[in-house]
Image: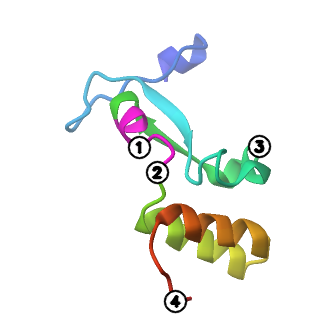
């Protein structure tokens, strides 16, 4: 909290990422769903190395999140189709 009060990124203090700075990352990548780039609900904190490793990949967790947003009418049909296509899997939802 002290780092954040000074305008710096927080440092993770426990677990496998201890010592790394936390970064805000998009759950659904901007390259896949640009209309969500400024939505707080599409952000999560990740360790810097985890954020770099994730890149703009769309895995099962992102597909599930996209489906939840689509069902809640927070994601358009077109955007939902881009999420499914980016996952590289034939999905049945």
Q: Which residue is mark 3?
A: 38
Mark 2 vs mark 3: which is more N-terminal?
3
Quadrant of the rendered structure where residue 46 is?
top left
- Observer able to see residue 74: no
- Observer able to see residue 82: yes
Foreground mark, 4 or 1, reads: 4
For label 1, count other residues whose C-alpha is less than 10 Å away and answer few (under 14), some (14-19) or many (20+): some
**Does residue 43 sit above or below 53 in this rendering?**
below
Quadrant of the rendered structure where residue 76 is?
bottom right
Q: Position of residue 90 (x, y in %)?
A: 48, 80
**Does residue 32 sit above or below 88 in this rendering?**
above
Q: Are marks 1 and 2 in contact (CB under 8 Å)?
A: yes
For label 2, count other residues whose C-alpha is less than 10 Å away and answer few (under 14), some (14-19) or many (20+): some
Q: Which residue is mark 4?
A: 92
Q: CA distance from mark 4 to mark 1?
A: 24 Å
- Residue 57: assigned label: 2
Q: Position of residue 15 (x, y in %)?
A: 21, 38
Mark 4 vs mark 2: which is more N-terminal?
2
- Please report the bounds of the magenta region as a residue range: 50-56
Horizontal relation, residue 30 to residue 18: left or right: right
Q: Which residue is mark 1?
A: 54
């Amino acid at each position: 909290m002290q780092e954040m009060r000074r305008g710096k990124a927080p440092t993770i203090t426990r677990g496998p990422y201890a010592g790394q700075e936390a970064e805000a990352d998009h759950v659904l990548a901007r390259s896949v769903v640009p209309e969500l780039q400024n939505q707080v609900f599409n952000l999560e904190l990740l360790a810097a190395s985890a954020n770099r490793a994730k890149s703009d990949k769309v895995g099962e967790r992102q597909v599930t999140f996209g489906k939840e947003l689509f069902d809640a009418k927070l994601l358009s049909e077109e955007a939902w189709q881009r999420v499914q296509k980016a996952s590289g899997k034939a999905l049945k939802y």
